[in-house]
Amino acid sequence: MRNPVRSPFIRVSLISLATVGLFAPAPASAQISTRVRTIHYQTCASSLTGAGISEADAAEACAAALYPQDLASCVTRIDNGTEIAATDALSGCRQVRRPIELATCVNDIDDTATGAESLVVLDNCRRSLLPIRFSACVVGLSREVDFAPTEALETCIAAGDRPSNLRPNFIPVGQEPVTPLIDPTVPPESTPVLPPSP
């Protein structure tokens, strides 16, 4: 008895079915994800206008955001947790890659570092590449060291650039220090010009 799978007719039928499957309509789950994205933009606009942002500014900000729900959450958390106006919060939240972390940074520092000007806190959190680490630095130093709030902000933002090419300060046992092939104190000699080969 022949194996039906090896039949050329069955192989052609399977290829035809696979091709038809490629062009079949998208499943319902793909349509749901479109609705979810629509809701995110709608919620963003609703949250921003509810915080006092004009409809035109809210529409522009939400349309430009990759994750509109994160942008709206950033603005409302800063607006509700600090004395920063929603328009200033929106300006800061639009300029960062991690808007949720920005809101956490601003709220944490505002809760702990009394006397720090809120807009200065917002600007420093916005400038930091790692806002949560930055706020941890400011809050930690403010609790232990007798710093003015602006001094803690300046110290932590200045510490953001760490040296990248550190050399070890020890030589492992059994290894001699490696001498460079080129001595930097000796000026390089001019390279002799060779005559062209015949």
Image (cartoon, grey):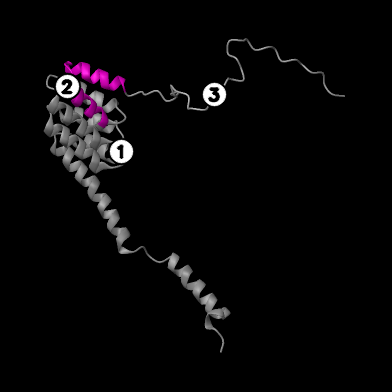
**The residue tagged with tag 3: helix, strand or loop?**
loop
Quarter of the image for residue 35 reads: bottom left
**Residue 183 in view, yes or no:** yes
Question: Which stretch did the figure color magenta?
Answer: 133-159
Q: Which residue is mark 1?
A: 64
Q: Secondary structure at mark 1?
A: helix
> Label 3: which residue?
176
Q: CA distance from mark 2 to mark 1?
A: 41 Å
The C terminus - image quarter: top right
| In the foreground, 153 or 32 | 153
Residue 39, percent from left and from top? 22, 50
Position of the N terminus, as image quadrant, is bottom right
> In the rendered structure, which disc, 2 or 3, sits on the residue that comes first in sequence?
2
Q: Position of residue 134 (x, y in %)?
A: 26, 27
Q: Is 14 included in the stretch rendered in magenta?
A: no
Q: Is residue 178 left or right of residue 124?
A: right
Name the amino acid type tagged 3: Glu
Which element is circle 2 on? Answer: helix
